[in-house]
Amino acid sequence: MALKTLSAKAAAALDKELMSTGAFSIDQLMELAGLSVSQAVYRVHPPARGPRVLVACGPGNNGGDGLVAARHLRHYGYLPTIYYPKRSKNELYQRLAKQLEDLEVPFVDDFGSAIKSTDHIVDAIFGRLQHRGSPNSADWVTGFSFSGEVREPFPSVIKALEETKVPVTSVDAPSSWNIEEGPPKSGLGSSFMPEYLISLTAPKPLVEHFNGRHFIGGRFVTPSIAKKYDFEMPAYQGLDQIVETGPTGQKL
């Protein structure tokens, strides 16, 4: 049986609930998400296949997940490089960047050059929910960080992701894809199909258009929340923070 997907509206409400009645902080959720991403990368591309990983980070929570994943990857023995052209002024993101700098993880400005000297790419540009302030504040954002308009320098990055032969792992949604409808019908991103996708918390409707290896990372959602939002929690094994499923969410 296929696992149910979570709409953008439901995912926004669930994320808000996790950080209010669920008592999670955004730091915790980002740490758990980034840990899941790092485990997915380790599963599909262990260091022996090539330790160089280029992590492309956007300005929102998706980018924060990428920064956390890069830190874990560095501790696993990889040699990550960070492309983070639109740094957030938020203290959380600044701390995450500082942690990487302390590990001597390089930050690069030229994605086109960096992509030529890497073994794997993590696409953490657009995808996950973008929040500002606290869950009850007036500036809480309940939409996904990709709104349909891609601003520089990201169009050239997405084009490079479309054209590269280097395997790509996308976080929650391939950048340029619509959460509900999948890839654009034409134009930028319409031919972008990463090899790997990790859905955070639960699969989104876009997985119906994805034909690579698919993982779910969300080993923190309580049974009561899963029941409320009407989706099935996968059976995580041992220490794993991820579960691999079929392209449309069915358990392998």
Image: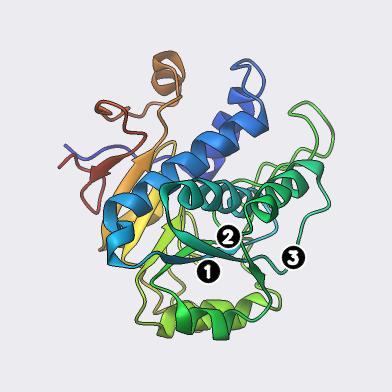
* Residue count near mark 1 (Cα–Cα under 10 Å), binned few <14, some 14–19, many ≥20: many
In the rendered structure, are the residues bearing label 1 and label 2 in contact, judged by CB atoms less than 8 Å apart?
yes
- Left or right: residue 77 compared with residue 83: left
Q: Nearer the viewer, mark 2 or mark 3?
A: 3
x then y, percent, for residue 101: 69, 55
Q: Which mark is residue 86?
A: 3
Between 175 and 242, the one nearer to me in the picture? 242
Type of the residue with mark 3: Lys
Type of the residue with mark 1: Ser
- Left or right: residue 126 compared with residue 36: right
Helix, strand or loop under label 1: loop
In this rendering, the answer to whether 2 lies above or below 234 is below
- Left or right: residue 63 compared with residue 139: left
In the rendered structure, are the residues bearing label 2 and label 3 in contact, judged by CB atoms less than 8 Å apart?
no
Residue underneath mark 1:
176
Image quarter where the C terminus lies is top left
Type of the residue with mark 2: Phe
The residue shown at (43%, 58%) is 78
Between 249 and 239, the one nearer to me in the picture? 239
